[in-house]
Amino acid sequence: MARASCLGPAGSYSELAAKRFLEDGGEVVLCRSFSEVISLCERGEVDFAVIPIENTIQGGVLQNLDLLEKADVFAVQELVLGIDHRLAYLAGVNIKEITRVYSHEQAIGQCTAFLREKLPEAQCIFTSSTAESLSKLDAHSAGIVGSHVFAEGVELSRENIADEKKNYTHFFKLVKRGEEALRGKRLFFCAVCKHEPGSLVHLLGIFAGYGKNMTRIESRPIKNVPGEYRFFIELEGDGSDPVVREMLKKARDYCLQFRILGNY
């Protein structure tokens, strides 16, 4: 039976994604942090790990981009999960008396209009996951959780409270490096270009020269090196294709640092 690690507690969107990846059933191992999720996979204690990598509203999950850059894992599959945020509160609680709202930072950021209009005086407090907010509920506290969550004695708002109703999160299925097959429709990698004018344009020109469409780019500052950045790039390409391999070699030879993070 397959085992998958993901961020807990039970009821998190990560757990829902892990169950989707398991398909025919298996065990979900709930973790307290994304670093623990990945570490279990690196040590071979689970068959794969599941992490969110991007949200259509908030953009990249920056913590996980930074983790992937160094981790001994490889993305082999992607899942796009629709996000439906609901306000959670104890049965019988008067919403007008709520003074604190708990949830993951991204979930709170995705519901700012509702919070500003309906709970303008409430303090927003970040938790490690949306599901963790259920443990914080009391007569004056609410949480933001997924519509799939059920907990005895807890009520959910009837409507999705997100600012943007068409809200999706992209999740990666990660396996330990050495167990991956370089094959898929899209490649994901990170690169550090030379610190000189036009270096990023030159790198992207390599991909354009091979007719490959770039589907995503995001930059992250390099720690302890002010003014320099690492670029996370996704583009169309099958790593088993000899022409794509040639393109990647040219990119690798040009960059100061270059690492393929996934092919899915």
Image: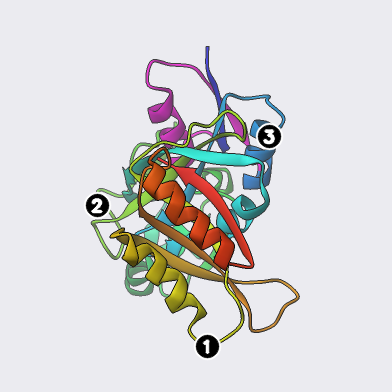
Which is nearer the eye, 71 or 238?
A: 238
Residue farthest toward the bottom in the current orientation of the protein:
197
Which is nearer the eye, 190 or 158?
A: 190
Q: Amino acid at mark 3?
A: Glu
Q: Do the numbered discs 2 and 3 sit on residues whose CB atoms are within 8 Å?
A: no
Could you say where residue 211 lies in the image, as x and y percent from the top left? 28, 60
Could you say where residue 232 lies in the image, as x and y percent from the top left? 50, 62
Q: Is residue 12 magenta?
A: yes
In the rendered view, tell whether residue 103 sits above or below residue 41.
below
Could you say where residue 173 lies in the image, as x and y percent from the top left? 48, 36
3D distance between C-alphas at marks 3 and 1 = 38 Å
| Residue beneath disc 1 | 197
Mark toward the viewer: 3 or 1: 1
Q: Amino acid at mark 1?
A: Pro
Q: Do the numbered discs 3 and 1 sit on residues whose CB atoms are within 8 Å?
A: no
Q: Earlier in the sequence, mark 2 or mark 3?
A: 3
| Residue beneath disc 3 | 42
Give the residue displayed 46% in from the left and 70% down from the top: 203
In the rendered view, tell whether residue 155 sits above or below residue 86.
above
| Residue beneath disc 2 | 159
Would residue 93 be seen by someone viewing this image from the given angle? yes
The magenta span reads 8-32
Which is nearer the eye, 141 or 242?
A: 242
